[in-house]
Image (spheres, grey):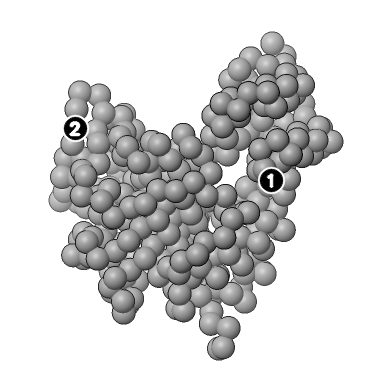
Amino acid sequence: MATLTIDTISDEELTALMQAINNRYGLDFTNYERTSLKRGIIRLMMKHNMESIIELWSLVLRDNEFFLGAIDDLLVNLTELFRNPDVWIKLRDIVIPEIPNKQMKIWHAGCSTGEEVYTMNIVLETLNLLNRAKLVATDLSNKALAKAKKGDYSHITLKQYLVPFLKFFPDRKMEDYFDFQDKHATIKSKYKANVAFKKHNLVMEPMDDKYDIIFCRNVMIYFDETLKHRVLDLLYGALKEDGYLIIGYYDIMPDYGKDKFGIYDVKTRIYKKISATK
């Protein structure tokens, strides 16, 4: 099999494939960051031993199940339990205590396999707010959402999360939050009770509710400037006045967003909504 690189796929081939996917499935990837998309396509082709994009094109357009599973390869999900623990410490110690309404609503946009969502609930529990908050967790991938709803992770995966977990909880154990079996562990049911998992296309579908905190971490790295503007408008409209937006360490806030979100804490990438009346 020939070695595949992003140069294997021309810009014209990428554009044509993305347009075909939009026509066939109503999912618009045409303004996603092109290099990231090409890497995703190469991952998919190598996974299925394909040598040309024509093979992929044919399978995507005739096999719904294949394409729905392929979304995970096209868009790599970056998440883990207590990822960047400084963020969670800042939330616990400063941000959440500042929110006057303790009946909080929190949206995790691009929740992937759920680790971020369950981290948030563990943090809320430390503040005795677990039963007073409602979380909405959305993603484009059915496969990721199914795993998130289950809250089931291998021992190997949890071991990888141990360092950030212990930075937040130096005196706690994973067993305090997970029910362990032979090769995997499941998040305790109380951390699922207040979460609604929903399929949602961040770049095409509105959100009807207003939230105190929105997480959109390491999602915008896949978008070009046009999509970033569209998503920032959506996030701005979905935040309550003085609400908080948390982006990923790999995300860069475009100049367009600086009139909508003021920097709250540079290190942890936490922003605060700027009121239109200010």
Q: Name the residue rendered at 84%, 36% in the picture.
A: 12
- In the displayed structure, would residue 135 be above or below residue 156? below
Q: Which quadrant is home to the N terminus?
A: top right
Q: Nearer the viewer, residue 153 or 101?
A: 101
Does residue 45 show up? yes
Category of crowding for the residue at label 2, using alpha-carbon neighbours closer than 10 angstroms: few (below 14), some (14–19), many (at least 20): some
Residue 105's x, y, as percent? 36, 65
Q: Name the residue rendered at 25%, 36% in the picture.
A: 186
Category of crowding for the residue at label 1, using alpha-carbon neighbours closer than 10 angstroms: few (below 14), some (14–19), many (at least 20): some
Disc 1 is placed on an element classified as: loop
> Image quarter for residue 187?
top left
> Image quarter for residue 28?
top right
Residue 80's x, y, as percent? 38, 43
Circle 1 residue:
28
C-alpha separation, residue under disc 2 versus residue under disc 1: 40 Å
Q: Which of marks 2 and 1 is nearer the N terminus?
A: 1
Disc 2 is placed on an element classified as: strand
- In the displayed structure, would residue 168 be above or below residue 12? below
> Image quarter for residue 74?
top right
Does residue 168 show up? no
Task: Tell which tag, 2 or 1, sits nearer the viewer.
Answer: 1
126 sits to left or right of 245: left
Give the label on residue 180, or none. 2
Residue 125's x, y, as percent? 21, 59
Amino acid tagged 2: Phe
- In the displayed structure, would residue 129 be above or below residue 184? below
